[in-house]
Each structure stands twice: as C-alpha cells, then as structure tokens.
Amino acid sequence: VYINVLSRQISTDTLTGLNNRRQLNRYLDLKINSAEANDNTFLMMLDADGFKSINDVFGHAAGDRALISIADVLKKSCAHKDCFLARLGGDEFVIVGDEESDFRPASLVENIAAHVAEFNRQTREPFQLSISAGWAYFQPGKVNTADALLMAADESMYVVKEGKRNRLPRSRHYRQHG
C-alpha cells in the first residue's frame, strides 16, 4: 500500500490531481513504442489564455483555483473516453487520445469550450476561463517521438492563440509538421 501511495504521489500533479509531466513522459514513451501507436493517436496541448493576469489581478490563490477548474473541465470533457490527462506545467495541459469515428480532436475542443462556457456562466470566481488548444498526430517516420509530438502540438496551439489575438478562426490542427 505504501509503495502504491508513493508511486501515485510521484506521478500526480498535487494541485490538479492530473498526471504530472514525469508520468506524461512515461506514458508517451510506452504509447509511442508500443504496437498500438498509429496515425490516429493525437496529443492535444492546452493553455489558459490570460492566466498571468488572473494571478496578477486576483492573486496566486485565484490562479490555483483557475488551474483546478481547468483540470475539472478537462476531466468532464474526457469522461467516458480513453484519454490520458496531464498538467505539463504552469498553465499548460495535455490530452493524449486515439481518434475514433465518434471522438475527434475538433469535437473534443468543442466539448471543452462548452464546459468552459458553462463554468463561466455558473462561477462565483472573479475570473473567467479561456483555453486555447492545438493538436498533432503521431506519424511514424516523422512526428514519432514524445518531443516531436509535444512540439508539433505546441506549435498548433500557438497558431490558435495567435488567431485569437488576431480574431482568426479558433480551430486548427496539423497532421504534418514542418
């Protein structure tokens, strides 16, 4: 029991209860190097828009509550789906999943947006949440390492963030990187 408790503590982000970066790296290495890795495997990178201003205006305790709320939104959005959720660090989160006919990254982003909107309507917090998301697919021979997948998804997310700043369409993803 003690070893299981320690193992869980080592692999979990204490604030959000999601997997931490160490566990994400382990999971990606296993997933990518397994027989089940295919071009339907995607990694979604998510970032809280304006997170620094939440900390600056409302304090770090409010920032922590915002991160916990984002984790809750992601858990709700991925309920009943086989997803791996992690907090990468700071205000960045990751979802790893396998695309299926009824489960695609674009529909997941819409589901997340709906849960964020619900949070913003119902919250008593002094802040509103906004999340940008981008994703990339595992590609044998091209985007085929954990670092390459993270980098491709990160670039996709920043295209979305820039689009929000410039009022361009919100969803964009890459099947090819480079």
Image: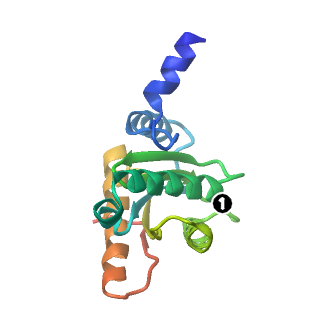
**Where in the figure is residue 123, as x and y percent of width and height?**
58, 67
Quarter of the image that includes the N terminus: top right
Residue 23: name its quadrant: top left
Quarter of the image that includes the C terminus: bottom left
Q: Secondary structure at mark 1?
A: loop
Tell which of 20 and 59 is nearer to you: 59
Residue lying furthest bottom = 167
Residue holding disc 1? 100
**Where in the figure is residue 94, as x and y percent of width and height?**
45, 52
Give the residue at x 37% y 81%: 164
Amino acid type for the residue under numbered disc 1: Glu
Viewed as shown, does residue 102 lie left or right of 123?
right
Number of disc labels: 1
Residue 153: name its quadrant: bottom left
In the image, residue 34 sits, relative to residue 168, either above or below, namely above
Tell which of 66 and 34 is nearer to you: 66
**Where in the figure is residue 167, as x and y percent of width and height?**
37, 88
Q: Within 10 angstroms of label 1, few (less than 14), some, or many (20 or more) residues?
A: few
Give the residue at x 37% y 68%: 49
Give the residue at x 45% y 68%: 127
Tell me if I can see residue 17 in this picture: yes
In the image, residue 85 sits, relative to residue 8, either above or below, namely below
Viewed as shown, does residue 164 lie left or right of 39?
left
In the image, residue 6 sits, relative to residue 167, either above or below, namely above
In the image, residue 3 sits, relative to residue 161, either above or below, namely above
Q: Which scheme is used to colour this image of the protein?
A: rainbow
Tell which of 94 and 14 is nearer to you: 14
Viewed as shown, does residue 25 lie left or right of 12?
left
Tell me if I can see residue 145 in this picture: no
